[in-house]
Amino acid sequence: MKHPTSSGIISALALITLGNSGCNAFTSVASNQRPSTATWMSEPSNTPATLVSQAAFVYGIDVLKADMGLEIIPEDQKPMYAIGKLEAELPLELVSGIRFSDCETVTLISQVRQDVVDATGLSSLDTIVAVRAGNDGEGNYAYYSDVRESSIQNTAQAYTEAINFAMTNSLPSIELEINRLVPMMPSQEDL
């Protein structure tokens, strides 16, 4: 199965909706040690991007903020957003450093240990849209799961299956495709 290994930062600008409810958290575990890299991609991909719905993304973040007792930005004060795509190689010894939260419309990364941030560029409030392992160097993966806007159960299952696949096949890491919501700032001309 062929999947993208690079992509441009894709922006979809729109005003969004919000809401709030409860979240459930999940933490995953595994081991092994090796460096990893992640970057914002600068070249457009030949394949369509795996993107979450912007409205679902913003709603999920608002659900998590409400659950944590944080202030939610009022609808009339919300900025416009872009959705960025990040691809991260996650060494097996770091897979326990990510905590997921089920936020109704998306599963968000609610907490990331600093060593995971340093190795991958992952951040709280990112969402995993694809999990893969066993890259043959040509964009083909022995394990691949699209978890865009999936429940925490489906995301955790794909995450665990990729880890197990990597461990069984003596692979040092798994790959995560991430979406990140990026607020758009007004230009100086607009001020």
Image (cartoon, rainbow, N blue to C red):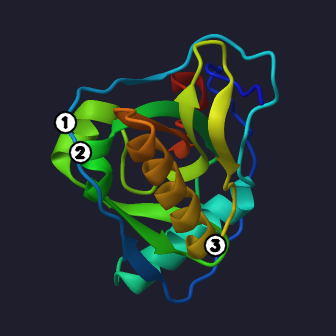
Q: Nearer the viewer, mark 3 or mark 1?
A: 1
Q: What whole-number distance in Å separates the C-alpha atoms at marks 3 and 1?
A: 29 Å
Q: Give the residue type at disc 1.
A: Gln
Q: Nearer the viewer, mark 2 or mark 3?
A: 2
Query: In the picture, which quadrant includes the N terminus?
Result: top right
Viewer-nearest residue: 31 or 177: 31
Residue drawn 40% across and 78% down?
A: 25
Residue drawn 43% across and 74% down?
A: 65
Left or right for 5, reference 3: left
Viewer-nearest residue: 161 or 112: 161
Q: Residues within 10 Å of mark 3 (few under 14, many from 20)?
A: some
Q: Residues within 10 Å of mark 2 (few under 14, many from 20)?
A: some
* Res 130 quadrant in image: top right
Q: Is residue 42 above or below residue 19?
A: above
The residue at which mark 3 appears reads as 151
Q: Is residue 43 above or below residue 50?
A: above
Q: Give the residue type at disc 2.
A: Glu
The residue at which mark 2 appears reads as 93
Q: Are discs 3 and 1 less than 8 Å apart at CB? A: no
Q: Is residue 116 visible?
A: yes
Label annotation for residue 33? 1
Find residue 40 and report its horizontal and vertical position in percent. 49, 23
- The numbered mark, 1 or 2, whose residue comes first in the sequence reads 1
- The numbered mark, 2 or 3, whose residue comes first in the sequence reads 2
* Res 118 quadrant in image: top left
